[in-house]
Image (spheres, rainbow, N blue to C red):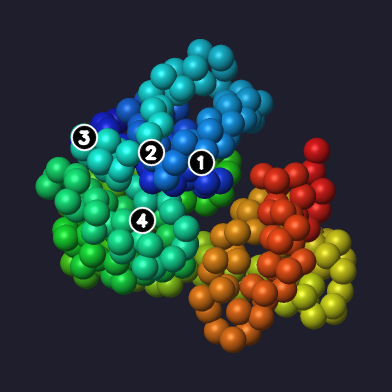
Amino acid sequence: MGTTIRKVSVLGTGVLGAQIAYQVAYSGFEVVAYDIDQQALSTARERFERLSHTYQAEVPGADDVRTSAASRWLRLTDDLADAAKDADLIIEAIPERLDLKRETFAKLNELAPASTIFATNSSTLLPSAMADSTGRPDKFLALHFANRVWQFNTAEVMGTERTDPAVTEELTAFAGAIGMIPIVVHKEKAGYVLNSLLVPLLNSALTLAAGGYAGVEDIDRTWRIATGAPLGPLQIYDVIGLMTPYNILAYGSDGDRELAAWLKTNYIDQNKLGVSSGEGFYKYA
């Protein structure tokens, strides 16, 4: 496989965390998926079942045999010590709150072997903001995946000034071994490459919708027609899930917090969370 990593734990089984765990298992690695309680794990099992069908429909070569194998490689737990005990690599994909991430990494440092590499999938936070909490800054970096990992298969690898270059090389090899195209970010940048390009677009679309400047469908139609893109920005929001942008905006500037409040009142409080709940900016079967 080109990597010494064999056992991987993924913390968080939300939309992207579940995709990461399933993709790693599908690629033949032993995976433990962790979440905070049995209710969250029950939801995760449903996500993994849906992913099995999605892979069979959309991934070349996927069939019952390969997706069944992925299920056998994938184990769920709500015990953090269990998730950490044998891991070669732990990928954190929990909500975008710096305090929560720092607290989680501090716990992991006590529970995981000294050799375990820690990675954050944070889409906006810099790994240097968490590095000291890990207790192993030389073995810590960001490994950021795009939503729909089986289709938009980039993995951004971004270390800090304290990350051992050998760890960066190891994670780059690991990304390739799980079917991703590694994108090495040479120095820290909030938003990495993907979100440095994407987030301004999404926030501009949200500002237009929240301000009543144009309707949701017209905002998306304008982008699709003018650029040839397959999805409009508000459709992309639905795919991502509205909780992630809400959590990011809620801790941002005054303008960001106003957008978060609008999103909460008009969508989140009505359980319009995106594709995963059946409705967001659009309705889904």
Badge 2 element: loop
Q: Earlier in the sequence, mark 1 or mark 4?
A: 1
Instruction: Give coordinates of residue 260: x percent, y percent.
Output: 64, 73
Say what amino acid the circle numbered 4 marks.
Answer: Thr
Q: Earlier in the sequence, mark 1 or mark 3?
A: 1
Residue 120, numbered circle = 4
Q: Earlier in the sequence, mark 4 or mark 3?
A: 3
User: Which residue is rendered at x = 80% and y = 80% of the image?
Assistant: 211
Q: In the visual, does 258 lie left or right of 251? A: right
Label 3, label 2: how far apart the Cα atoms are: 15 Å
Q: Are marks 1 and 2 in contact (CB under 8 Å)?
A: yes
Instruction: Give coordinates of residue 217: x percent, y percent.
Output: 86, 61
Q: Nearer the viewer, mark 4 or mark 3?
A: 3
In front of the other: 172 or 27: 27
Label 1, label 2: how far apart the Cα atoms are: 9 Å
Say what amino acid the circle numbered 2 marks.
Answer: Asp
Say what amino acid the circle numbered 3 marks.
Answer: Asp
Q: Nearer the viewer, mark 1 or mark 3?
A: 1
Q: Nearer the viewer, mark 1 or mark 4?
A: 1
Residue designated by label 3: 86
Badge 3 element: loop
